[in-house]
Amino acid sequence: MAVTDPALMQLLAGAAQTLAASDAPELTVERVLASIDRELGWTATVERDQATIAVTWHDGAHSAGREAFSEALTALVELAGRAQPYGPGAVLDAQSFAAALDRISAGARWRGARMALAVFEVDGMLLGPGIDESTMVETVGQAARRAVRGDDIVGHLGAAQFALLFPRAGTFEGRSAFRRVREAVIALDRGALACGAAGFAELEPGQTGTELLNQARERMAAARMRSAYTSPGGGSPTQPLAS
């Protein structure tokens, strides 16, 4: 491409649009920088050193436009990092998951895109002597993380309750992914861990992320009650059966 100031502005505009997407997948920053590097071709090389973006101009020319391009690109990457502070493979805590849910649901409403959510309990996470809660949560969360798509989000909501967020997917895909998660949790060498009741919900027009989460939780509670009534031996309809 001809490296004119308008061309550089177009690259920045495209980068900003991609980085600002509410459902931007993991490694989006790296993909954007690689794309800009390809567009610049032999004229320049784009490299990232933590939060700083270095643009090396191979023709030796310098201009105010090129300097502004480098500064603006660095600022875009920094803002993208603040908007999505978790890295690839992260298991989000309740607060971070709520923020991601609000951000992605807002983008899905604006684009008219699909989005699904699953909330489930993990039986057998009672802590005993020498068992650290954070370690247990990380173990289960990473098992779930490996079982879903790279763009999906895994969160721990507390009290052995986890959530899976599926951008650009519906309930059918969410149920399929949960089955993979359930198998991954069972396969853990942690004794009697197993996924218990689960609730699924798909974003409806005008629905907020909080409303979607509440809907999934209500359906999880209903699934727990059905399990209590229909499982052998009966039991309390308000308490899940032991795994």
Image (cartoon, rainbow, N blue to C red):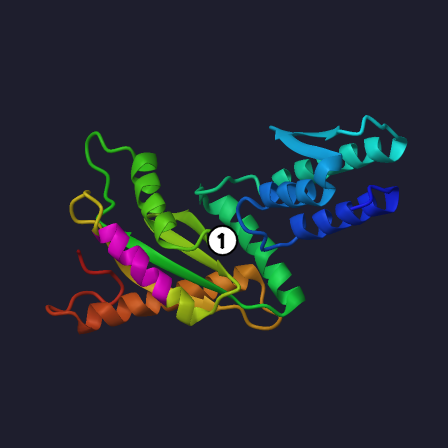
Front one among 89 and 15 = 15
Q: Give amino acid for label 1.
A: Asp
Q: Is residue 195 above or below residue 114?
A: above
Q: Which residue is pictured at 21% across the width and 29% down the height? A: 130
- In the image, taking residue 22 as reference, residue 89 lies left or right, namely left
Instruction: Kindly identify which residue carries mark 1.
Output: 151
Q: For numbered disc 1, what is the local secondary structure?
A: loop
Q: Which residue is pictured at 16% across the width and 70% down the height? A: 231
- In the image, taking residue 189 as reference, residue 55 lies left or right, namely right
The location of residue 88, given as percent across then percent down, is 48, 42
Quadrant of res 46: top right
Quadrant of res 66: top right
Quadrant of res 69: top right
Q: Is residue 92 above or below residue 233?
A: above
The location of residue 76, given as percent across then percent down, is 71, 40
- In the image, taking residue 110 as reference, residue 186 lies left or right, namely left
Total labels: the figure holds 1
Image quadrant occupied by the C terminus = bottom left
Front one among 214 and 39 = 39
Front one among 108 and 219 = 108
Q: Which residue is pictured at 43% across the width and 49% down the height? A: 155
**Can the viewer see residue 166?**
yes
Give the magenta-colored segment's residue range.
176-186
Q: Is the stretch drawn in magenta largely helix, strand or loop? A: helix
Q: Outermost residue toward the right?
A: 64
The location of residue 157, given as percent across then percent down, is 41, 49
**Residue 181 inside the magenta-drawn segment:** yes
**Can the viewer see residue 75?**
no
